Image (cartoon, rainbow, N blue to C red):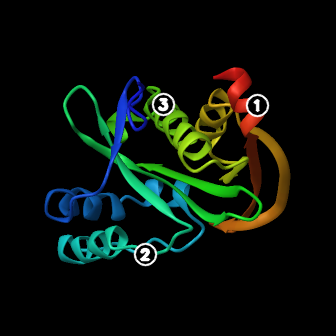
Amino acid sequence: MVNLLHGQLVRLVAANADKDAETMARWSRDSEFGRLLDTDPIMPSSPAQSKEDIRKWMENEDPTRFGFVMRALTDDTLLGFVGIGNISWTNGTGWASIGIGAREYWGKGYGTDAMRVLLRFAFTELNLLRVALNVFEYNPRAIKSYEKAGFKIEGCSRGVLNRDGKRYDAFEMGILRDEWERDA
């Protein structure tokens, strides 16, 4: 039987507040990481605040959200986080999110592997029919990674994001379970 939460490069596990807080606090101070991840203003946090945030995240009782941290299979390095949220059980849909804070792992296939593991979880364990995500036009590395995992660009929100006085588009990407099954 396949280990559902293991890929070729990463494994998805629950976050450990004591073990992961300092690393996550460091990532919160990385403005490039923050701008690739979200539209919200960058908000650095302390290790104590990160520890509390992780505890709240892991105590989640929201049945429409599943979150994990990703660790490298080779040395257990904390790489980032990944999750499925805003699940509509009626429609079988959910929204994926991912962030790799460990810069030394950027562009080396870890994000693609983590997304493939997340999709396997979403389609086989949660029985979803569609997974979507949003990505900013200025993140071509992520777009390429999502396409490798099977996502297709489905739409564009033009000029939705303001960064340094310039407007940027956001793309909605999605994958259907039958596409994933065909290409997996």
Front-most of residues 22 and 20 = 20
Give the labeled residue for mark 2. Answer: 61
Residue 178's place in the image compared with 1, above or below, is below
Mark 3 or mark 2: which comes first in sequence?
2
Q: At numbered mark 2, what does the secondary structure look like: helix, strand or loop?
A: loop
Of the numbered discs 2 and 1, the one sitting upstream in the chain is 2
Distance of label 3 from label 1 (alpha carbons): 17 Å
**Which residue is under mark 1?**
179
Query: Is residue 90 among what the camera can see?
Result: yes
In this rendering, is residue 45 above or below 170? below
SS at mark 1 in the image: helix
The three-letter amino acid code for the residue at tag 3 is: Asp
The outermost residue toward the front is 1
Relative horizontal placement of residue 47, taking residue 35 as reference (left or right): left
Residue that appears at 33% across and 67% down? 58
Res. 55 image quadrant: bottom left
> Type of residue at label 1?
Glu
Looking at the image, tell me whether mark 3 or mark 1 is earlier in sequence order.
3
Percent position (x, y) of residue 79?
A: 33, 43
Query: For this view, does 73 lie left or right of residue 106?
Result: left
Counting from the top left corner in percent of width and height, residue 105 is at 36, 34
Q: Residues within 10 Å of mark 3 (few under 14, many from 20)?
A: many
**Does 106 sit above or below residue 40?**
above
Check the picture and name the quadrant holding the C terminus. top right
Amino acid type, residue under disc 2 in the picture: Glu
Eye-nearest disc, 3 or 2: 2
Please tell me which residue is depicted at 70% across the width and 51% down the height of the picture: 132
Vertical side of 141 occupied by 171: above or below: below
Would residue 117 be found to the left or right of residue 94 on screen?
left
Q: Report which residue position mark 3 lands on.
A: 113
Q: Quadrant of the N terminus?
A: top left
**Which is more foreground, mark 3 or mark 1?**
1
